[in-house]
Amino acid sequence: MIELHDLTKRYGDKTAVNGLSFQVRPGVITGFLGPNGAGKSTTMRLILDLDRPTSGRVTIDGKGYGHLSEPLKYIGALLEATAVHPGRTAYHHLLWQAQSNRVPERRVDEVLALVGLTEVAGKRARGFSLGMRQRLGIASALLGDPEILMFDEPVNGLDPEGILWIRNLMKRLAAEGRTVFVSSHLMSEMALTADHLVVIGKGRLLADLPMAQFIERNSRSAVRLRTPHPEQLLDALARQSIAVEPGPDGSYEVVGGDPAALGELAAGHGITLHELSQQRASLEEAFMRMTADAVEYHAGAQTDGPHDAAGAPGAWGASWQGEQKGRN
Ligand SMILES: Nc1ncnc2c1ncn2[C@@H]1O[C@H](COP(=O)(O)OP(=O)(O)OP(=O)(O)O)[C@@H](O)[C@H]1O
């Protein structure tokens, strides 16, 4: 288990990580989400003791990283810029790491097989594709057979087959009871991979909750209605005390409505409908809404998130702060 206690990291007057406290538990995949620049990589570097916190601390199975005698046997990591000497073969890259951590040499062959690189074990890393380099980085992370694995943006730049492979590998590792902590700035990827979510923005914790709860809270469904006779429709809905919200392009939306019942209501009043459709907020939209206030660099006009009447940008994140306290 990884535990962060009020962790803060400042670079000059820039606060990259701001009072973060959370736990990463074994047996599940914990997704670490946040927009670009949110502080994910910095947090991961702090966990691995590659950078010193300004204040606060991290423990791994109750100990500071510096107190782990052979760290590769506790925690393995794939960081974004995993360095591999271009002139070294995959085998020798792993062997060098194994020897410096007193990992038996036979483990090198095991991890090469695990990541599917056995056939290219003797080839120099300079000829490796991005996907092969990712696999080699993962082989390094697995070398010490650690109980905790950390992956920083592991699917960046990978093709669909590579993405699927990494996703399945992480699921297998979690199913074996290991702690799997994986960062991404893509909600869509996390939705397919993670069991639990930790969301940060501008270095601060925005949410810490199971994926199922995230989905439940964000599956806001609405029925969209469009008619050439809006006054009649609004009147018919009001008579049934059905609340309606303005939708895009002159449409109307009934949050939580039943399309069949609404269609029959319209038909019963002889109202022509040009649209009767079920709308669902995507998780990506929910994530963007949650982190909207925390995005450092907005692209042009994309400052106000998706159309939705559910709340101002950022409001959901603030209202979820309480979630962290419920987790134990
Ligand atoms: N060594 C450093 N010196 C100064 N500022 C830094 C340093 N490392 C990170 N930062 C700043 O800290 C903030 C957090 O950066 P970090 O790379 O941790 O974010 P991230 O969530 O991993 O982003 P991304 O998704 O883009 O990788 C950014 O504003 C970044 O510019």
Image (tube, rainbow, N blue to C red):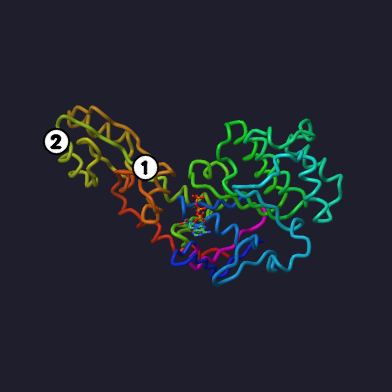
Q: How many marks?
A: 2
Query: Are the residues at dot 2 and dot 1 in contact (C-beta closer than 8 Å)?
Result: no
- Mark 2 and mark 1: Cα distance apart in space: 24 Å
Where, by quadrant of the figure, is residue 129 drawn? Answer: top right
**Where's residue 299, x and y in %?**
35, 44
Query: Looking at the picture, does residue 248 appear above or below residue 152?
Result: above
Q: Residues within 10 Å of mark 1 (few under 14, many from 20)?
A: some
Q: Secondary structure at mark 2?
A: helix
Residue count near mark 2 (Cα–Cα under 10 Å), binned few <14, some 14–19, many ≥20? some
Q: Specify start and end residues of the magenta stretch as a single range.
A: 17-27
- Left or right of 268? Residue 87 is right
Q: Nearer the viewer, residue 123 or 245?
A: 123
Q: Nearer the viewer, mark 2 or mark 1?
A: 1
Where residue 304 appears, x then y in whole percent?
30, 48
Residue kind at label 1, given as amino acid type: Ser
On whether residue 24 falls in the magenta region, the answer is yes
Residue 15, horizontal then vertical, whole percent: 46, 64
Q: Which residue is mark 1?
A: 221
Q: Is residue 60 above or below residue 159?
A: below
Residue nearest the observer in this picture, 267 or 144: 144
Q: Main secondary structure of the magenta part?
A: strand
Please state the horizontal and vertical placement of residue 307, each as a whole percent of the image. 30, 43
In the image, which disc is placed on residue 64? Answer: none
Q: Secondary structure at mark 1?
A: strand
At 49% from the left edge and 64% from the top edge, which residue is drawn?
Answer: 11
Under mark 2, the amino acid is Gln
Which residue occupies the foreground of this view, 215 or 21? 21
Residue found at the far left of this picture: 231
Which residue is denoted by mark 2 in the rendering? 232
Say whether residue 210 is left or right of residue 130: left
* Quadrant holding the N terminus: bottom right
Q: Residue at x 31, y 48 (%)?
A: 303
